[in-house]
Image (spheres, rainbow, N blue to C red):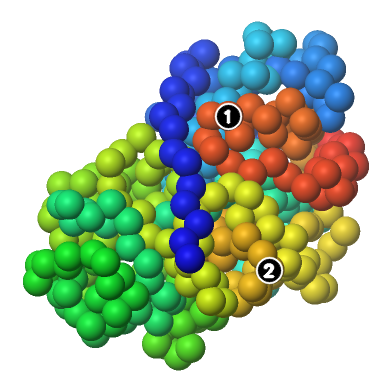
Amino acid sequence: MTITSTRRIVPGVAALALALSLAACGGSSDDETSTDSTSSGDTSTGGDAATGLSGTIAAGGSSAQETAQEAWRAGFGASNPDVTITYDPVGSGTGRDNFYSGAYAFAGSDSAISDEDLPKAQAACGNSDVIELPVFISPIDIIFNLPGVDSLNLDAATIADIFNGTITTWNDDAIADQNPDVDLPDTAISPVHRSDSSGTTDNFTDWLYQASGGAWATEHSSDWPTQGGEAAEKTSGVIGAVTDGEGTIGYADDSAVATTELGVVSVKVGDTYVAPSADGAAVGLAASAPVEGRSASDLAYAINRTATDAGIYPVFMASYFIACSTYSDAATADIVKAFGKYIVSDTGQKAAAANALSAPMPSDIAAKADSILDGITAG
């Protein structure tokens, strides 16, 4: 049995203002210019607008978050015309690095800060606690370009063998046995992966490692861990490479796939093949647990990729809003707090769901996140 998802085209939200300057956790920086900008607005969980906010801050990171960030900044900006927030979709790894260096006041990341990098984040925050909130919950689609084939059923071991180069043609028995009603050609398979450090890659390889029964040998990594295949930069690059090449297969955030005509894989969960969906991703987060040993302001999750709860889609990201609990500049602290509270509000989550096809944060996690953001101070 295959559960299919309904796809629809969602228009992006236009940018509202041009970036003027950068601000960072420890102050401001003039060393980097963002390529994507929007003003900020509505701030609290109840949707009340902030008043008296003024200034410019820079942020960036996850390219998968880009469409949601457009919606958030447009909604926030409607009520705060004197605030400019820039968001540069440079990829999760670069976004975290720029947060550590102080170039970004907050970062979007499709994977949580590692234990090894946590001291860097704390230092960037003046040794105050780091804030990590799973604000964007979204499926990762496994996409392919095979004329005449719109969907396939594949288990994790088969997908692992495709991406590690063991399976090289589309009519391989491992694929054909799971798709007896599909006429598969002998076309060569060309796997496409991210060339940049990417939280999407981190989540995808985490699923391969946990769910493939040993077919994928390396643990999760933001940098593609194996040789071979085609490399493409950012989400848009993977979409473009798969679109342009017959026989290609890749992975990308669901919101970026929705407007394409690419084939999409349903993955095996227990005895069922499940198509990507926001609801399935939300079930996946609910089946997971917070990372142990983190501060009360850090809601990083250890994702369980082998759960078989009904409707679960295990290839997903819980993409984070990463910020500081203390900023040296009061204006930066006020803007980050207000914008973060808008993001986790019911209004903000609905805006992201409409624009980026994401799943709204579970209400209990959203309430915790709102309380954590209340604690942001200047000092």
Answer whether residue 297 is visible to the viewer in this image: yes
Badge 1 density bin: few <14, some 14–19, many ≥20, Cα 10 Å: some
The residue shown at (44%, 39%) is 7
- Residue 309: which disc? 2
Horizontal relation, residue 365 to residue 39: left or right: right
The residue that disc 1 covers is 354
- Residue 30: which disc? none
- Residues under labels 1 and 2: Cα distance? 25 Å
The residue shown at (30%, 70%) is 179
Label 1 or label 2, whichever lies nearer to me, is 2
- What x and y, as percent, mark residue 210? 54, 80
Nearest the viewer among 172 and 226 is 172
The residue shown at (48%, 47%) is 5
Q: Where, by quadrant of the figure, is residue 336 drawn?
A: top right
Residue situated furthest bottom in the rendering: 214
Horizontal relation, residue 106 to residue 240: left or right: right
Q: Is residue 196 above or below residue 156?
A: above
CB atoms of marks 1 and 2 within 8 Å? no
